[in-house]
Amino acid sequence: MTHGPSQEGARLPRSPWDSPAPVPGRVRIAVLGSTGSIGTSTLDVIEASAGQFSAWLLAAHRSVGPLLEQARRLRPTWVVVVDEAAAAGIRAGDLPAGTRLAVGSAALAELVAAPAVDRVVSAIVGAAGLDSTWAAIDAGKTVALANKETLVMAGPLVMRRARETGATILPVDSEHSAIHQALAAGRADEVRRIILTASGGPFRTRPQHTLAAATPEEALRHPTWSMGPKITIDSATMMNKALELIEARWLFDVPADRLAVAVHPQSIVHSLVEFVDGSVIAQLSPPDMRLPIQYALTFPRRTDGPARRLDFTAGMTLEFEPPDLSRFPAVGLGHRAAARGGTAGCVLNAANEAAVAAFLAGRIRFTDIAEVCGQVLDRHAFSSEPTLDEIRGLDAWAREEVATWATA
């Protein structure tokens, strides 16, 4: 693990847990994916910060209407629309005075590296977030990482590059933020196991034989979280936990056999760390993404903020159970990919993105998502130390394989 001194006592070079240098005055934030669920929660944190933070850049793929509304409200220096066709409809008077427009992925990558940017919130969903996140890390930025796919696809490359450039990666996923906080209770060599919690999604207790007939509308009814459609479907299949296992493998530099999953329907305990003496440290809070976002933006300090609080004067029951791997085979795929490393995470992620899109479009059944992902994972040309170009090539290959499977 890389959250503290090594066992020999030497200081690791710019690990993800090194405190970034304090920034005088207002902290300027670049929000990538500002119109999504993580992006909008980030803007809540910025607006509630009493001037501590400012939105320097807001970026979206093609959601021009919501992006322009955000720009009028927060008055950033830049807005970026990645999709050129979507940007073509923006008129000169649509942006507030002092806000400039940039278009395309190359412009976004250039702007996140600008000296004016203090912290980058990487909240673009899916593989599309890799390039802009890489640009921020390449520039040595402090990155609040909500785009788990960056580490799922290219974890060893990303972490190596962060060490080389002095970039700091702080997790925004509630589970990884909880682990980050719990790890502060001990040394790296004192950690026995990391346990990621999962809500179990909307189908935790549904009869297993009926899952094949589950509709997109049913799968999108998450019991505790409000998220975008892709992430919500991932929660229903528990593929989100598979991807989080892979992310944790690289982010915390821990072997896959020391990572576990526990189903916790209340979504109050966000993850746990078990130490060698038997102590288990957990982080608890209501299911509100504004808390891990703010933690990543203020680290190493803590400040008051807009997130909800637990009410310990009211009754509360917390339940834990092991995941049913026959009901949720995606969890097993995550363990396999985390253990194997190399290109396994990239292929699993790409296959899942394509399979979720096919399910939402009505081309495959709910239970087909994990099945096709497993088949594509088994068939791919594995590489233990891929380059970024190889990762991009296998990402495209896996999506084509799922498209062929879905139309067969």
Image (cartoon, grey):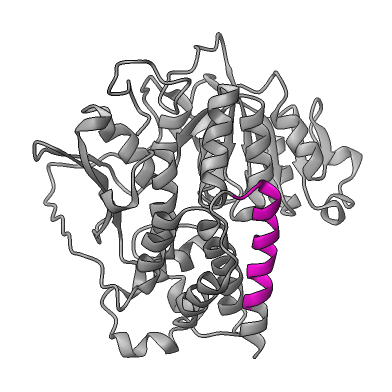
Q: Is residue 388 magenta?
A: yes
Question: Where residue 51 sits in the image (x, y, percent)?
Answer: 54, 19
Q: Nearer the viewer, residue 270 or 77?
A: 270
Question: Where residue 369 sits in the image (x, y, percent)?
Answer: 49, 77
- Name which residue lies at 59% across and 84% down: 362
Q: Is residue 361 left or right of residue 236?
A: right
Q: Is residue 56 left or right of residue 338?
A: right
- Name which residue lies at 13% across and 56% down: 317
Question: Where residue 78 sits in the image (x, y, percent)?
Answer: 76, 31
| Vertical comparison of 68 with 405: above or below | above
Q: Is residue 240 left or right of residue 93?
A: left
Q: Is residue 379 magenta?
A: no
Q: Magenta span: helix, strand or loop, mainly?
A: helix
- Name which residue lies at 48% across and 18% down: 20
Question: Where residue 333 sits in the image (x, y, percent)?
Answer: 41, 67
On the rendered image, what quadrant is the N terminus found in? top left
Magenta span of residues: 386-402
Residue 294: quadrant of the picture: top left
Q: Nearer the viewer, residue 43 or 365?
A: 365
- Name which residue lies at 52% across and 69% down: 377
